[in-house]
Amino acid sequence: MDTVLRHPHLTAWARAHLAPLAGAGAPPGARETVRVWLRHDAQLAPTTAALGISVPGARKRLTRVEALLERSLLRSPSARHDLWPAQRAEELA
């Protein structure tokens, strides 16, 4: 999978997909919150422990990220399926 994710077209897609998380309107820590959330299989309890924040705090952060990405993270698994390869492709670039 990593070989496929290293393809320049996928790297460009990943950067475009994740760009709102580092844009001017992004709250501090948006990228790290998503990274940690994905690393913990989108489970709030382990994510909050890793970030050192409360569950409501993590929900609030993820709700802000939803607004940036214009899609649901907490209700729909499809966003996770897009974010994981985007995150990994960007890490490999």
Image (cartoon, helix red, strand yellow):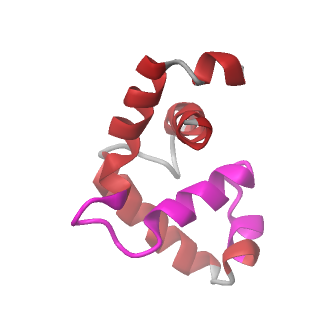
Q: Is residue 55 left or right of residue 90?
A: right
Residue at x 40% of width, y 45% of height: 18
Q: Is residue 44 above or below residue 57?
A: above
Residue at x 33% of width, y 37% of height: 16
Q: Is residue 60 above or below residue 3?
A: below
Q: Position of residue 51 (x, y in %)?
A: 66, 76
Q: Position of residue 49 (x, y in %)?
A: 76, 76
Q: Which residues are magenta?
A: 22-48
Which image quadrant is residue 66 in? bottom left
24 part of magenta stretch: yes
Q: Position of residue 14 (x, y in %)?
A: 44, 34
Residue at x 48% of width, y 60% of height: 31
Viewer-nearest residue: 43 or 52: 52
Residue at x 53% of width, y 80% of height: 57
Viewer-nearest residue: 58 or 39: 39
Q: Is residue 36 above or below residue 27?
A: above
